[in-house]
Amino acid sequence: PVAVKLADYSPYPFEIEQVDLAFDLDPDATKVSATLKISRKPGGGTAALVLDGEALDLKSIHLDGRLLGPEDYALTEKALTLPDVPDAFELKTIVEISPAKNTALSGLYISGGRFCTQCESVGFRRITFYPDRPDVMSRFFVTLTADKAACPIMLSNGTPGDVQDAGNGRHTITWDDPHKKPSYLFALCAGDYDVYRDTFTTMSGREIALAVHVDKGDAPRAAWAMDSLKRSMKWDEDTYGREYDLGVFNIVAVRDFNFGAMENKGLNVFNSAYVLADEDSATDADFEAIESIVGHEYFHNWTGNRITCRDWFQLCLKEGLTVFRDQNFSADMRSRPVQRIKDVIRLRGRQFAEDAGPLAHPVRPDTYGSIDNLYTATVYEKGAEVIGMLRRIIGPEAYRKGMDLYFERHDGQAVTIEDFYACFADVTGRDFTQFRRWYSQAGTPQVTVAESWNADAGELTIQLSQSTPPTPGQKDKLPVPIPLELALLDGTGGTDAWTVVLDQPEMTLTRKATGARPLLSVNRDFSAPIRVERDLTRDQRIALVVAETDPFNQWDGVQTLVTEEILKLSEGSQAQPDDQLVDAVASAVRKAAGDPAFAALLTRLPEVGELFLERSPAEPVALHSARKRLQAALSRALSDTITTTLAAPSPTPYEPSAEQAGIRALRAAFITLLGASGAPDAGDTLLALYNAAPNMTERLAAMRALTALGTCQARDTALADFEQRWKHNAIVMDKWFAVQAGQGTAATVAELAAHPDFDLKNPNRVRSVAGVFASANLAAFHAPDGSGYKAVEDIILKADAANPALAARLLTAFEQWRRLEPKARAAAEATLKRLQNAKLSENSADIVSRALG
Ligand code: DPP
Ligand code: ZN
């Protein structure tokens, strides 16, 4: 693909004052007529009118009522150009499209027999000719006409008019969206749904009609999504002073969906996996994900929709900020420290890996090959961390003032990161030039901490230094301002905490302490998205965990200890874990019993994907085996606690509350450990737990632990039972596929891909097999004989022909290939080269060429 560059941005020369869209909906041939009121911008010169359009069957064009002929325009596969247009005019195009044939799931398509759309980033051009870029904002009127029986419900953005008869068994409705918006926020959904309804009264007393649209029979399972929506609306009022701005808010669940969800104005479209939940079919993690994604999409109404991005390079302007908002929403709904730990696990697992490989890019990239490939952990998760650092540096009050100014100043506009920071500069008087390096520089900064104690002076000297490794296209890095929360701990709970901003390559601090030498706690609450390097012995690290008063660092201290242990164990295939280390971890888990959600996280061992980053060359098979040995030792050390905990009943009646979820999280963690114990009766015990599990959280944990045992009767019994029970529920069956792909071999993947319910057209299903295998089963994916690559390659090649965005996402799993031990590395390279020579989509070709580059 040809690279697009931020530096080449130029404003669109025309204003689209109003858009009237009329859809005559038909699965095979939908007629779309678009009437655009267009005027040349002052100073717009004599530019030609260029409209984006792809895969459209053009039927006619009228300019101010005059039918144009082929001599009046130029039509290519990507654009419609009218070289000679007046300063103000009305343009009407009629095109035909086929939703049923649209397998890319971008534009207008059919899922579960219903019409739906996905337009971000560039799907609208697959619906009609239009300047499909976020800085062209317009007022939309949308008329939908469809078969009454097939589509009793017809939705779009804004406010609905009355439904009217259109003859021939069809009916029609017009939606009017009073808020100007870019085309990527357009949506329509039409079909037969069950609807779960409620209302929300806003802070100014307006009543909003809320509705969640789901498959027939699923309405009761939409209750949690609705509850999450109402809490999101209230939270944005309380926390940011933002009120909802339309009379209706609709959510539609769609089975086949590339994203998790989409924030279209007043009509959020969701992957059904993030709408439907009840205790039997969903885990606590599912409930949590629904809450956070419903929040995320709702919060976009102000950060994304009312104020949008000038161009797609600014994607983090809405995504990083909105992830930061949804993380804080979740933290307020649940436990803040537990939420922080989960956010960091996600960041390290996905974003640190991205930063360390050939796909590394800045939070705001300055060039891209394929726009769909811009939706990355760096833009989202690191983008959120950067907002968190901004808030830490300027404080919560100044942060809120800056946000208020941003909303006031830029409402209705399409803006840049510079515009956003100008608001914070104006309210604080600070200069954010250096801070904005976080947006332009890729790579994870590393901070080295050294300390020395002067007993006579009672003073600790702390030497800090930072460096950021080179990334593709960026060899030399400049220092970034790193807010570091530090504390001196006296070991009895005494905590002297303060914050420094490390904005130089090196910095020396001194801090007085009363009494004996204190312990130094660094990057508390993970105050910056960095790697911290400290030269400490195991005993010093254990002492630090015991003395630590910051929950994040307590957990992270344990993570560091177990990471070092696994790395050491991976050097010898028979090496056994150190008893003292295992006891220290077990005792931390026992001590945390009063906060079971936290205790559950303490039992977690870093995934192979994280361990991988600590080694070059990396041997996933050895890391996996070492991890298993440590897990077994931890299981034995905790065996009494595990038995007692699991003998107690699970909380009843079931509630999705954080308290109950915490208890179940610890039960599930112990079920996992039980399976890792190596005890001969583990299979029977797990099968009994599987059969007795009163909720999906524990049932799935038991099934996963059974699957980890490898081939055995108990495993087969559980898998067969699960399939029998849930074969009619696709979302639950995704778990069945994922559990096996996450633990099996390449042969398992081939078997799952041959299962009659494997569906290449359904992204959730493809991800639950190929995506889970390639991202969460690294020992098998990176098998030295290349079998894992082959299994995934076969699926990717087939998926790519139907859905390029999906295939490209799967391909990112190859990003770590250069770190691998020589055999796997050679096999990975050969696979990538084969893929490079295959006829891949632009999206996939972009990933392959960057991975090899
Ligand atoms: N729908 C995706 C999200 O909300 C892209 N905007 O992040
Ligand atoms: Zn988003």
Image (cartoon, grey):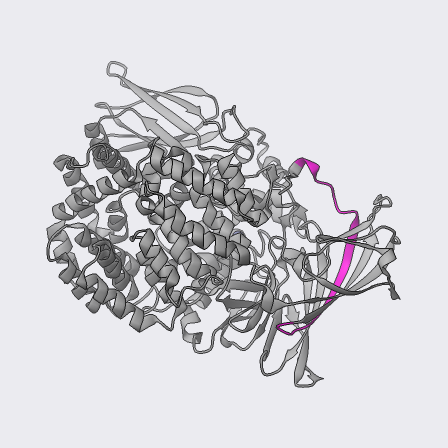
| In front of the other: 229 or 626 | 626
Instruction: Determine the residue positioned at 36% across, 30% down.
Output: 532
Q: Which residue lies furthest to the bottom in this view?
A: 168
Please tell me whether residue 68 belongs to the stretch shown in magenta.
no
Instruction: Determine the residue positioned at 47% across, 52% down.
Output: 796
| In front of the other: 822 or 608 | 822
Name the quadrant of the N terminus.
top right
Task: Please indicate, yes or no, whether residue 72 appears anywhere in the rendered image.
Answer: yes
- Looking at the picture, how far across and down is residue 107, in whole percent? 62, 61
Stretch in magenta: 7-28
Q: How many numbered markers are drawn? A: 0
Quadrant assignment, res 94 = bottom right
Instruction: Determine the residue positioned at 22% across, 26% down.
Output: 537
| In front of the other: 59 or 334 | 59
- Looking at the picture, how far across and down is residue 556, in whole percent? 30, 38
Task: Please indicate, yes or no, whether residue 493 appears anywhere in the rendered image.
Answer: no
- Looking at the picture, how far across and down is residue 220, in whole percent? 41, 75
- Looking at the picture, how far across and down is residue 181, in whole percent? 67, 57
Answer left or right for 549 relative to 392: left
Please tell me whether residue 21 belongs to the stretch shown in magenta.
yes
Quadrant assignment, res 819 = top left
Height in image: 263 above or below 822? below
